[in-house]
Image: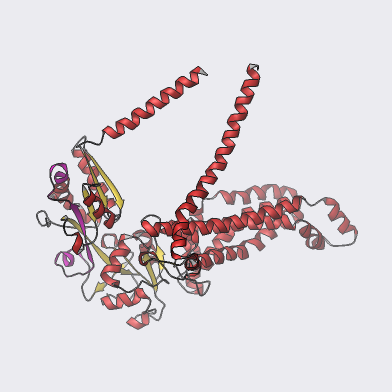
Amino acid sequence: MSKLRAISAGLCLLLSFLLFSCRSDRSASEIIVAGSTSVQPFADKWAEVFMEKRYGVVVNIQGGGSSAGIQAVRTGAANIGMSSRELKEDEKDLNEIEVARDGLAIVVHPENVLGNMTIDQVRSIFSGEITNWKTLNGADKNITVVVREEGSGTRGAFQEMVMGKTRISKRAIVQDSNGTVREIVSRDPNAVGFISLGLVNEKVKAIALDGIFPSEESILGKKYRLVRPFLFLTRGEPHGLVKEFIDFVLSEEIQTLMPKEGLIPVSPGRGRS
Amino acid sequence: MTKLERNDRLIRISLLMVAFSAVSVLAIITIFIFEQGTPIMFKYGVRSFLLGGDWYPSEKSFGLLPMIAGSLMVTFGALIAGVPLGLASAIFLTEFSHRRLTRILKPVIELLAGIPSVVYGFLGLMFLVPFIRENFGGPGLSVLAASIILGIMILPTVISIAIDSIRAVPDSYREGSIALGATKWQTVRMVVLPAARSGIIAGIILGMGRAIGETMAVIMIAGNAADIPGSILQPVRTLTSNIALEMAYASGEHREALFATGVILFIIIMILNTIANLTSARQKR
């Protein structure tokens, strides 16, 4: 029995030591970045590279959504907030730095004869008002609309930029990732969906909107409309490690990597601050 | 007290604790789901949850009727697809097949239960969905696709429980029937099956539980549109898919509404399990 007691006492000691050491780690060498789940996977990569260079520094990336990120940086729970939407008027008190841009592409099956749509047509398709490709001078086939699930940032951006106040049809097929939306559109000749521009590949066809094809040039030239910013937000001017991390993300090293990851870079110095 | 007795008591107490921990996990899950899910149901009205047809959580519209209907539809469809096949296999394996063949086939059928559901979903997506789209129309991701795949997934449950209950019928029943001049098929249909009925029903209800709780395979092939389908070729969303699809980004009331979805699912499954327990208890008596 006494042996057991000794072991459990040892375990308790070890546990409290672990807990204690975890707490004492939160020093000046850690920054917390929280917000948009669309930015999160990219920020994870940037943080990884950053932490490799700056040994001993911890960049903690958390999700939660754009609004949660804005709230977190305001209350000081996070050093940097991530947002994948423009700030609203009453949020403008925060300091915003655009670190990248993400285009949203409307995609169809490669065999689809259509190559161009107006924003109004896209809205009518996704609201369920237009249900047959014939209405748009396509084949006499019912349209299979594929969307993302409620709560996803991509759906939120699409709702905001294309649908406005109009509801997305509840008849639409719902998938929980950009990848599966692309997969279904690539297999169904009658399907249409929306995905991040960076994920468009040869299996699906991106549609031009009002005559403008989504590409890096048309987005940088502010011609293509479905673009959302990836913003880093700070309370007041960034300094110290926070500034170091933001500058690192804006540096040529990371920015030149962005097209490979499907993002549109903001060239160094062009970030608003 | 000898050392042996003391050890005995120690072991009994620790086993009791282990047994209680399993029960308390169930209790904790129940309390947690209800604690998280019921407040929002009462806030917006239980009626609007159960009978509302619009699921737009971002607009505070939490109608779960399409998902309740969806779950019931695919579960019912799975029974239509799986039960006749399962029952026929069970009858064949117990009454008609060679004993050696049964010894090989039964474990193989039970292996079906060991295949991960994501594999069923993947196969459905690769073969069944395009087949339905090309031959019957619609997007392919549909009630039909989900029903067929779920029907296959419940086969092992239905078959093995049906086999056990058919085997439990005493041979004297069969001998009596044949002595009266009945053929083998007449014996099976009029004597063996009625005698094994409650066991078979319990198996079907357990299969139903499996079908209604299945998530991964259904998300992959059902299309997940939050609308009551007008035909079996249209997409459908079940209660489980609703939770799994939207859990990742849900926050605030949206998240609570997903717990409310869990509450409804929990109640439905509890009802099914109770029915299954009652019917199998009746058979033992």
The answer to whether B17 is drawn above or below residue B116 in the figure is: above
Judged left or right of residue B210, residue B38 is left
Find out whether residue A221 is within the magenta segment. yes
Asked whether, in this view, residue B134 is left or right of residue A132, the answer is: right
Image spot of residue B157 (x, y percent): 63, 53
Residue B113 visible somewhere in the drawing: yes
Location of residue A149 by image quarter: bottom left
Q: Quadrant of residue A152?
A: bottom left
Name the residue furthest right. Answer: B180
- Residue drawn at point x = 59 percent, y = 65 percent: B76
- The residue lying toward the viewer, choosing from A103 and B255, is B255
**How has the structure been colored for display?**
secondary structure
Residue at point 35%, 64% (across, down): B58
Was residue B262 drawn as part of the magenta stretch in this picture? no
Quadrant for the N terminus of chain B in the image: top right
> Does any portion of residue A202 appear in the rendered image?
no
Locate residue A269 relative to residue B94 in the image: left or right: left
Residue B279 percent coordinates (x, y)? 70, 55
Q: Which range is magenta?
A: A215-244
Q: Position of residue A215 (x, y in %)?
A: 21, 65
> Residue A190: horizontal and vertical position, in percent?
39, 73
In this view, the residue in front, B150 or A164, is A164
Relative vertical location of residue B275 with respect to residue A189 in this rendering, above or below: above
Count of number-bearing discs? 0
Q: Residue at x 18, y 39 (%)?
A: A53
